[in-house]
Image (cartoon, grey):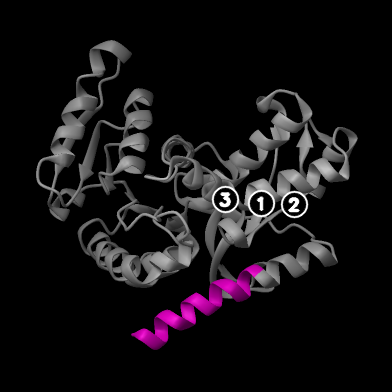
Amino acid sequence: MDKIALVGAGRVGEAAAAVLAQKDIARELVLIGTRPGVARGTALDLAEWAPLFGFDTRVQGSTELDGLAGADLVVVSAGRPRKPGMSRSDVLDANAPLVAGIAARVGRIAPEAALIAVANPVDILTHVAWRASGLPRERVIGLSGTLDAARMAGFVAEESGLSHQDVRAPVVGGHGDNVAPWPCYTTISGIPLNAFLTQAAIDRVVARTRQGGAEILALKQTSSAHAAPGAAVSAMVDAIAHDRKRLLPCVAILVGEYGQRDVAMDVPVILGRTGIERIIALDPGPDEAEQVRQSAAAIRRDLDRLRVAA
């Protein structure tokens, strides 16, 4: 890619920028933040890694959204972070107008770009960004599924004592409490999960996946997760930039898939150069179908609240 813009120079934006710069995915990487000096200082700090890690990506910082011009891909992590005891919905009222304003500028300044939404609640804000940007649904994608799937895979590896590299763990639904981990589709080197774990262990994996972000927030107290979200962003960007056709769970705008319309939620997708190239329709059993319905209902409640407030 020629240019990637990251709007939000906080911890997630910095973590994503660090991985993307080291991978040399783009000729230019622009960090955009509101606090004077922070984005430029972070960019300078990362640029000074170049001789040590051997990359040639040009890293810059800015406080102006005009830096979006010419971007092939825009990552929006700007937003109010959670504090201990807060749900993702608790930050919705503050983050929705912010993300809508940024997405609208993306639509005007970088109309050919793909947009990855990161700020919470990411499923709601992916929908907000799609509406505000005017971009096609294939090019507006939310982070959470790739992150939640990585968390689930990590917990499976911990419970089983086997390699992280061999675990494939799809998730659907919303983010956090609304995520629906599907153990029935989870495998270790292609072998079903129940060949390795008891039902009690699988239940622990599911519970920890749903509380993955909250667990980190409770432990750290002063900040939420940023390393794993940044790495998840980089995995999505890499799939798009290199047209890898990777199968990843991502937040997508649904128009009938999984029985849902006009809602954004995690589903397995093929990510390539044009963004979401295909949504993979799995055949859920009764329990999994009910999880999807419950997730969609929770997401719609927040969307409806936003519409009433508007």
Q: Quadrant of the C terminus?
A: bottom left
Contact between marks 2 and 3 (CB within 8 A): the answer is no
Label 1 with label 3: CB-CB less than 8 Å: yes
- Picture quarter containing residue 18? top left
- Rendered residue at 24%/26% (across/down): 46
Left/right of residue 308 with respect to residue 250 in the rendered view: left
Q: Nearer the viewer, residue 284 or 14?
A: 14
Q: Earlier in the sequence, mark 2 or mark 1?
A: 1
Residue 86 spot, x, y in % from top left? 45, 61
Which quadrant of the structure image shows residue 102? Answer: bottom left
| Residue annotated with mark 3 | 145
Task: Check contact, mark 2 vs mark 1: CB within 8 A.
Answer: yes
Q: Secondary structure at mark 1?
A: strand
Where is residue 64 drawn, in percent x and y?
A: 12, 52
Judge whether 68 appears above or below 90 on screen: above
- Please name the residue shown 64% across and 47% down the image: 209
Q: Amino acid under label 2? A: Trp
Q: Amino acid at mark 1?
A: Val
Q: Amino acid at mark 3?
A: Gly
Question: Which of 241 and 60 lies nearest the eye of the viewer?
Answer: 60
Q: Which residue is mark 2?
A: 182
**Magenta stretch containing residue 297, yes or no?**
yes
Residue 88: image x %, image y %? 47, 62
Q: Residues within 10 Å of mark 2 (few under 14, many from 20)?
A: some
Which residue: 20% across, 19% down?
48
Toward the viewer: 259 or 157?
A: 157
- Look at the picture and state if 70 lies above or below 103: above
Over which residues does the magenta segment extend?
295-310
In 3D space, how far apart are the residues under numbered discs 2 and 3 (Cα atoms)? Answer: 12 Å
Q: Which residue is mark 1?
A: 171
How far across and down, in percent of the image, does residue 105 sit? 22, 63
Give the structural element (helix, strand or loop) at label 2.
Answer: loop
